[in-house]
Image (cartoon, rainbow, N blue to C red):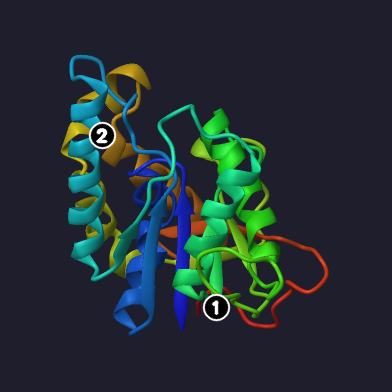
Amino acid sequence: MNILAVGAHPDDLEILCGGTLAKYAKRGDKVFMAHLCNGNMGGKDIAPEELADIRDREAKNSAAIIGAEALGPVAGDLDLYPTKEMRIAVVDIIRMAKPDVIITHSVNDYMPDHVITGRLVFDAAFTATLPLYKTKLPAHEKIMPIYYMETLAGFGFEPSHYVDITEFMAIKKKMLLAHESQYKWLSGHHQAEPVKMLEKVAGFRGVQCGVEYAEAFSMARVWGRISMESLLP
């Protein structure tokens, strides 16, 4: 299977679905980790252009830990909008990855880039299947299920699926820590120690589904995208 996870920023996937992606990779699936924004606003004392380069390297280093391919970006932080041009860019990410499953942000998350990423992915996932919608790449005609990652800290999020990531928590942490530029930034600006946050949220979701650590998702419940299979056993 091909798995495409699309986050807004270079570290979002590690925080919200890193364990699930590691689990997919271990069983032999091809994993693509895309970020639509370049991360150039995720800091304080580094010039945006330099920070974007740093975060691109960090994203590739993180993806390499599980043998995934890093894709993106298509915009700067907070320069992501639901325009035709950006939808086309996401269409071509989907057409390149040819996914069997797509994972992305909930449209109810806490900041604009996350919300718009979720909306763009939903719109582009249908558009990418249409042979007469011409872009740089040919259509990927499979209509694939979409799973939304939970919101940061789980606010307003009701899971439909859980993935047991107990075996993969150490890898999830290692992937996040590959984003070295973000550790102090997240701890300071967001007032949350990143690794502790991972443990608490995954532990809480684990309690809900009867395992030690889990990640939570909600399937896009629309015609044509309801899968009879679990997200991941």
| Image side of residue 192 versus residue 138, left or right | left
Residue carrying label 2:
52
Q: Name the amino acid, label 1.
A: Asp
| Image side of residue 105 versus residue 172, left or right | right
Nearer the observer, disc 2 or disc 1? 2
Residue carrying label 1:
100
Question: Dot 1: what SS?
Answer: loop
Residue drawn at the location 71% of the way across and 60% of the way down: 220
Residue drawn at the location 63% of the way across and 82% of the way down: 229
Q: Residues within 10 Å of mark 1 (few under 14, many from 20)?
A: some
Image coords of residue 15 (percent x, y): 38, 47
| Image side of residue 38 versus residue 87, left or right | left
Residue drawn at the location 32% of the way across and 75% of the way down: 25
| Image side of residue 45 versus residue 208, left or right | left
The answer to whether residue 197 is above or below residue 178 is above
Image coords of residue 113 (percent x, y): 52, 34
Mark 2 to mark 1 CA distance (whole Å): 30 Å
Q: Name the amino acid, label 2.
A: Ala
Front one among 14 and 159: 14
Residue 111 quadrant: top right
Q: Residues within 10 Å of mark 2 (few under 14, many from 20)?
A: many
The answer to whether residue 94 is above or below residue 14 is below
Which numbered disc flags the more N-terminal residue, 2 or 1?
A: 2
Residue 54 quadrant: top left
The answer to whether residue 191 is above or below residue 81 is above
The answer to whether residue 46 is above or below residue 208 is above
